[in-house]
Image: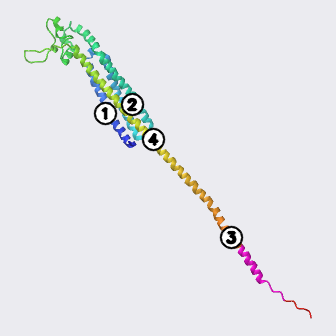
Amino acid sequence: MVSLRAKEVFCLFYALVLFFSGIFLIGFSVVFSYKLFYHFKFIPSASVGPFILLFLLGFIHLFLTWLAVKGPTRQHDCHIIMFLFITVVLLLAECAIGVWNMVLWDEVDVEAVLLMTDSFKTVIHEDFNKNSEWNKLQSKLKCCGLNGIGDYKTTKGSFPVSCCEEQNGPNVTCYEESCRLPMARYIKRILLQGAIMSFLSCLFQAVGVFLFYSFFQSLRKDRNDKLARRMTLQQELAENAAHNMSLNQSSPLSASSVHSPEAGDTEKSKKSSKRRSSKGSAPATPPTQANA
């Protein structure tokens, strides 16, 4: 059976990992949010919601680190119970965020295509080389147009520079793939990574609940054992004190009962000696003479 001290060490190690997990959540949430905002014109706004929540939950991880250190070291029930309660709430929240990411993952490709279609209708009638959003999209994902390079046929055979690779020679290679599928894969990859991060964090919180609940149970058992030993010791001391008191009260009676026969014998011996002395000291009566 694991001792209370060993469980305390496990809890403190968990607190250290919890601190770094909070930094991890904050950092990766910022990175994923930046990737989404980079092409935000073609990405459903709901896709950013899970990462904003994970960013906020990262700060709760940092706050929980303080409770995770205070509880085992000070052995305060209040800190441990607060830690368990907040951790359970955090576990449920991160699990819900993971599910939310998976729901968005299943629906984001259709919504992204609708946003791209609306945007491309305005781009095709304007100077597409000046449209920074589509140029960033086509350069980043190495794609061209909504359905392919053929979407720019209405522009008298010209197409954006962002649809081609940068080459110094006269021959230029252009991207043939449309931007619909790469954009959907781009968003789905980010949402899938967010879901994995959420579920891993949820599993990590479950480990924390197990460790601290086990420590709390061992702490209560150790306190009960100490209290039982203290009460047993106090009871033994009280019994010993009562026994010593009874011995002290019975010792004078026994002493008087032992010495009383001797006193009676001495008195009897004194009386008998007085009688013998009185008999020995009495004068003898002279004999009477007969009359002549």
Q: Secondary structure at mark 1?
A: helix
How many angstroms separate mark 4 from mark 1 (CA)?
Answer: 32 Å
Residue 280's image quarter? bottom right
Contact between labelled residues 3 and 4, with CB atoms less than 8 Å apart:
no
Q: Which residues are magenta?
A: 268-286
Query: If the image is split into quadrants, where does the N terminus sit?
Result: top left
Specify whether 174 is left or right of 230. left
Query: If the image is split into quadrants, where does the C terminus sit?
Result: bottom right
Contact between labelled residues 2 and 4, with CB atoms less than 8 Å apart:
no
Which residue is rendered at x = 77% and y = 80% of the image? 278
How many angstroms separate mark 2 from mark 1 (CA)?
Answer: 16 Å
How many angstroms separate mark 4 from mark 2 (CA)?
Answer: 23 Å
Q: Which mark is residue 191?
A: none
Q: Position of residue 103 (x, y in %)?
A: 33, 18
The residue identified by callout 4 is: 221
- Of circles 4 and 1, the one toward us is 4
Depth order, front residue of 160/258? 258
Is residue 118 magenta-colored?
Answer: no
The scheme the figure's colours follow is rainbow
Q: Chief secondary structure of the magenta span?
A: helix
Q: Secondary structure at mark 4?
A: helix
> Which amino acid does the dot numbered 4 rest on?
Lys
Specify whether 267 is left or right of 46. right
Mark 1 nearby-residue class (10 Å; few <14, some 14–19, many ≥20): some
Depth order, front residue of 31/104? 104
Contact between labelled residues 1 and 4, with CB atoms less than 8 Å apart:
no
Q: Secondary structure at mark 3?
A: helix
Q: Position of residue 267 (x, y in %)?
A: 71, 72
The residue identified by callout 2 is: 87
The residue identified by callout 1 is: 20
- Of circles 4 and 2, the one toward us is 4
N-terminal-most mark, 4 or 3: 4
